[in-house]
Amino acid sequence: MNTKEQPIDREVLVGRVFTPATPVSEGALFAGRMVQLRKVLDTINQRGQHTIIFGERGVGKTSLASVLSSRLRIPGTTVIAPRVNCDSADTYSSLWKKVFSQIDLLRKTPTVGFQMSILEETVKAADVIGEEVTPDAVRRMLTLLADTGLFIIIFDEFDRIMEPLVRRSMADTIKALSDHDVNVTLVVVGVADSVEDLISQHESIERAMVQIKMPRMSRSELQQILDNGMERLKMTMDEDGKAEIAALSQGLPHYTHLLGLHATRVALDRGSLDITSREIEPAVKRALADVNQAVRGAYDRAIFSPRKDTLYAQVLLACALAGTGEFGFFTAASVRDPLSTITGKRYEIPGFARHLNDFCEESRGSILQKAGVKRKFRFRFRNPLMQPLVIMQGLSEGRISRAVLGRDH
């Protein structure tokens, strides 16, 4: 093949197909997550039920929420799905103002004159509900709006709400909507290990909330992202290339999009529509240059040492390759074998335990989080997006070979 066939369209399209900086919003490009998606759709179709989607940062929670409306096309039914991003300064009132500012109402007002007439004007629901918004006022407004169509309200990044009163008020709202059988579904999305981390008094609304934990994506799901992209671009990627990108991504679709984007551009730059594993190495180098500077800075701070014989870079890479549990935690023992592979020397836990503890300290950016008790400590990356970066850096610097990526860690 050659790139003379619609080169301009493809060059533009690749940045729309692979979107590492933004959630997937187009249903045709959404990959995997069918179990979680079906749970959300089932919840929407059951009156009095609401959904909370939680999990690690970067696992695709927002993308799942973004494609809901495209999966709810019902003949003769209007789907209304306002989505708001929460921030740390939000109050309960400001959150719902964000929601209602996206909804238009038709207000009818009798006019005074020689002939009675009705003046119709469009106003925002936010202007009607008033300044001080309460759970009961929200319930009454949503009761009125519920008759206009299939109503879904998505609160994204709810973990950024730190004020306990706001979280309690949201729990009260969910309970009120469920108790009054209001035909509206709330979808709360946030970074958390458990529902308790997001919603206060969750026990009181347990029967009304369907809890959906988003695990990291499987390698087959990540490869589906690449397959969807190749189909849209009318290009191909060989199995080795897809497998390597999926392994490097460590279950995080952000990196699949990032590496897919750069591998595609590398192939186009050399005049080919066929991506092979040879595009992956230069794609990794481009991706490393394109990584968020805050993440890059945290990595550099964690491994920095004026001495050349320190093990910080090697131990951090071993942490990235260590086997983990459900919540991304690993033990010191699980670091031992990867570190031996990286260094070619057998290290026992006392030889690197200090490094693990240092990574939890502010002096090294608290790149790791520690939990548990002495002699039973567990560790994990504070920012999950750091783990693939560490592995890509190790691959780029020759600390590990591609063969290591073929193993499930």
Image: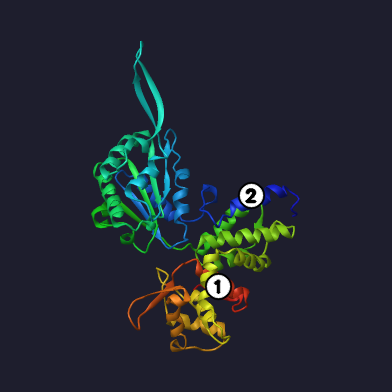
> Which residue is under mark 1?
391
Q: Residues within 10 Å of mark 1 (few under 14, many from 20)?
A: many
Q: Does residue 181 sit above or below 76 in this rendering?
A: below
Would you say 91 lies left or right of 381 here?
left
> Which residue is at a point 31% across and 47% down the rendered structure image?
49
How far across and how far down the image is residue 80, in percent? 42, 39
Instruction: Identify the secondary structure beneath mark 1.
Output: helix
Q: Where is residue 393 in the image (x, y as percent from the top left)?
A: 58, 73
Horizontal side of 104 relative to 197 (left or right) equals: right
Residue 169 x, y percent position in the rendering: 28, 50
Local crowd at mark 2 within 10 Å, few (<14), some, or many (≥20)? some
For the N terminus, the quadrant is bottom right
Residue beneath disc 2:
13
In the rendered view, how is the structure colored?
rainbow
Secondary structure beneath dot 2 equals helix
Of 78 and 100, the residue lying toward us? 100
Closer to the camera in the image, 123 or 183: 123
Q: Earlier in the sequence, mark 1 or mark 2?
A: 2
Q: Which amino acid does label 1 sit on?
A: Ile
How many dots with numbers?
Answer: 2
Looking at the image, is 398 positioned above or below residue 260? below
- Is residue 208 at least partly visible in the picture? no
Residue 46, by quadrant, is: top left
- Type of residue at label 2? Leu
